[in-house]
Image (cartoon, rainbow, N blue to C red):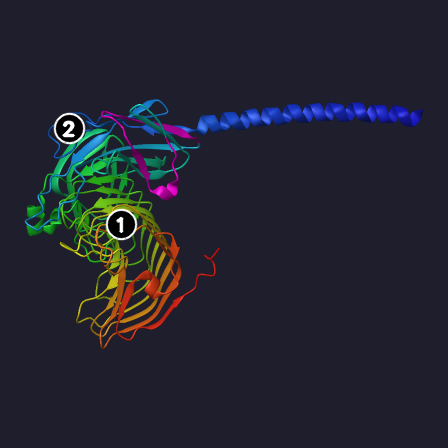
Amino acid sequence: MKNMKYSKFINVRLNQLSSNFIQFGMLFLLFFSCYQVANAELKTYGSPGDLSKVPNLLESSDYSVKVNGKPSFVYETINDWDGGGHPNPIRMEQKAAFTNFDFKDETVKVEVTCNFEVNSVTIRPKNDSVTFTQKGNTISFSLTKSKYLSIEVNDRKRPLFVFADSIVTAPKADIVYGPGIHVIGSKFPLTDNQSVYIAGGAVVVGSFYSKGTNLKINGRGILNSGNVKWAEWCKDKEFSPLTIVTKMPSFDVCGITMVNAPGWHVNAYGINANFIDLKCIAWAGMTDGPHLNGNSLMKHCFIFNNDDALISNIRDNNTFTDCVVWKGPYGHCMISLNDNPQKNVLWEDIDVIGDQARLDFMPGKMMAVTTRDNSNTVKENFTFRNIRIEGQLVDKAGIIYLAAKGSSVYKNINFENITAELLRTNTSLPEGYIIQSKEATIDGVHFKGLKMNGQLIKTLSDANVKVNGNVQNIDFDNSKYEK
């Protein structure tokens, strides 16, 4: 009897504890849910004001965008480059629209309404696997984290770029441009240790010039350098959106969108430079993306330009990671093109969503390491990893180009997990070259998981890559990638 009483008492207490535990759990979940909602954030940006006097930047006539029902202003820039007198260098895109917003800790729904009939939709990079629904002329999709996307409706002639960034805390800055239009003109002076903040919804017209170091340009706004044209820039390259003439300066450019650069986006031989969340949209020839010049990083950036995109220029330890590239007829996508000794350069997690290099104009390369004919440099430990190539590849001179000239020495060049969608009008062209001059050395070219049009490549013959010279130690290791 006594045991039965104790058993009954214990059961009652267990039921009470269980009930209390459930109530506590429900309260905890409710609190956690409220905490998440309270911390979920979304920032969209409206019109900066009257764009009529801002060169080659206007409100989009093709698209309107809402994020979780909130309008996000859509800009448009038109292809206004005449080709500079070169034969057939004009890219096919007629204009590009773009919008940007920031969010964290939630799923956002993006609605794109087109002011024209929608027949087909492609969202790139394809690797992001963004699914969409279409209802009439409205395209809807959801995002859970920062992505830079190209929405291509019907064709590729007027893409919409969606720059979905993470929310960051605005840093303290010496110069602050709030929402609105700010005309600063060319070569606005900056000094040592100076910081600039361009807020979301701000458009700054002009360019920055500095003789200092330790500079910072941050924000979510726009730097539009369309007040200078390509011909003027060719005469004075200090008209670049950012010019730093100090020898080996340190600087950061983070978060902003550079539009309508007349030439190189950054004219500086900086060391310890960081480019993070940077977006570049430019039409003219020679609109290189920022060059990395030693101990430098380019991370989560978007480049739509018309020349070299991800360039390791001089010195060691340069890294490009999580970037999206769409370039025009000029230049190369990923390249080391200098005669300086260099080691430890990495291109990783790169999506190439378009490339128009044409052999009748300029034979650009996709992944390239090269020097000049009189070079005697040493380049070693170069790695191209997790590279996804898709989009408009027309008569390219191959995706791989290694050219050791003069008495140069190349050691340990790695290509790993490369997938390439190749579209050609001339299928007889090779897909790459490995070239060694008589006095030069290429020792160690390693392929792991190279795929072309879905085929896993096991030999240079499979890849249609041509070799000239006594190149040593080329090997294929697909053990991780074979089914």
Residue behind mark 1: 423
In this view, 328 is above or below 432: above
Query: Which residue is more in the foreground, 166 or 272?
Result: 166
Q: Amino acid at mark 2?
A: Leu
At numbered mark 1, what does the secondary structure look like: helix, strand or loop?
loop
Residue behind mark 2: 51
In this view, 153 is above or below 358: above
Mark 1 to mark 2: distance in Å? 39 Å
| Residue located at (24% from left, 26% from top) | 117
Q: Amino acid at mark 1?
A: Leu
Q: Position of residue 357 (x, y in %)?
A: 20, 52
Q: Is residue 382 magenta?
A: no
Q: Is residue 110 left or right of residue 394?
A: right
Question: Which label sits in the foreground, 1 or 2?
Answer: 1
Which of the 4 quarters of the picture holds residue 137?
top left
Q: Position of residue 437 (x, y in %)?
A: 22, 73
Which of the 4 quarters of the picture holds residue 443?
bottom left
In this view, 164 is above or below 234: above
Which of the 4 quarters of the picture holds residue 429?
bottom left
Q: Which residues are magenta?
A: 106-132
Q: Position of residue 287 (x, y in %)?
A: 17, 48
